Amino acid sequence: MKHMTAVLVKFVAALIAFAVGLDLFFSATIVDIVTFAFIVTFFSYMLVERVILPKLGSMAATIVDFTFTYMSVWIFGSILLNNYMQVAWGSIISAVIVTSIEVFVHRYLTDSTLDERIETSAPSVFSPNLAYGTEFAEDHDMDKRALLKQERVEENNEEKEK
């Protein structure tokens, strides 16, 4: 039930954002606005709230939400609404509005499902605090020509010594 509340809030926020962002600059139909809101809500919920938020946290989920909303409105808006520059501003405004609401949705989901995740979580393999070191070394590989040249020089030196 907690997830249904979050999805409903996401959908209403997306409706408002797309109504402002898309209808402000050009006349997008209500079907376009509802379709954008449904698609962004569904895929954003499945990708961000179910996968990224539990694994990487609220900041990463908010960044992915902004990027996903911006790119989806930009790509599908330029295809459907045939005005590239207005779609750019509409997608920026829509992404900012959706992202500002998503901060509260993420906070709600992390607070309400914290007990649920503690009981059922398995230890994570991924740790964002891992420190990776890089080893630097010189390679002493020589190709056959260099080896032959070196052997000839050594033979010449030996002959001169005799």
Image (spheres, rainbow, N blue to C red):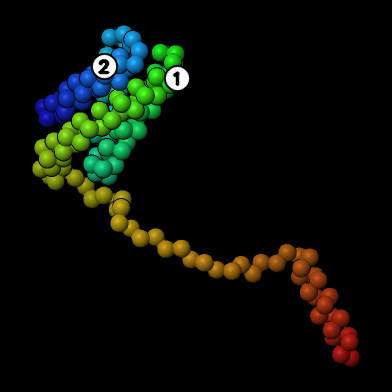
Please give the name of the residue rendered at 80% of the width and 70% of the height, measured from the top-left corner. 148
As shown in the figure, which amino acid type bears the numbered disc 1? Tyr
Q: Position of residue 53 (x, y in %)?
A: 24, 39
Where residue 162 sits, quadrant-wise, is bottom right
Residue 76 in sight from this viewpoint = no
Q: Are there few (<14), some (14-19), or many (20+) residues within 10 Å of tag 2?
A: many
Q: Tell me: residue 141, above or below residue 78.
A: below
State the count of labels. Answer: 2
The quarter of the picture where residue 86 lies is top left
Q: Residue furthest front?
A: 25
In the picture, the disc for residue 51 is none
- Badge 1 marks a residue whose secondary structure is helix
Place of residue 87 in the rendered image (x, y in percent of width and height, measured from the top left): 39, 20
Q: Which mark is residue 19?
A: 2
Using a 10 Å C-alpha cutoff, classify the residue at mark 1 as few (fewer than 14 neighbours), some (14 to 19) or many (20 or more).
some
Question: Which of the 4 image quarters holds residue 5?
Answer: top left
Instruction: Note whether 24 is above or below 146 in the view shown.
Output: above
- For residue 84, which numbered disc appears in the image? 1
The quarter of the picture where the N terminus appears is top left
In this rendered view, identify the residue nearer to me: 98 or 39: 98
Which of the marked residues, 2 or 1, is nearer the chain's N terminus?
A: 2
Residue 55, image x, y percentages: 26, 44
The amino acid marked with disc number 2 is: Ala
Q: Which residue is drawn at 29% across and 53% down?
A: 127
**Cα separation between marks 2 and 1:** 18 Å
Q: Where is residue 75 in the image (x, y as percent from the top left)?
A: 42, 22
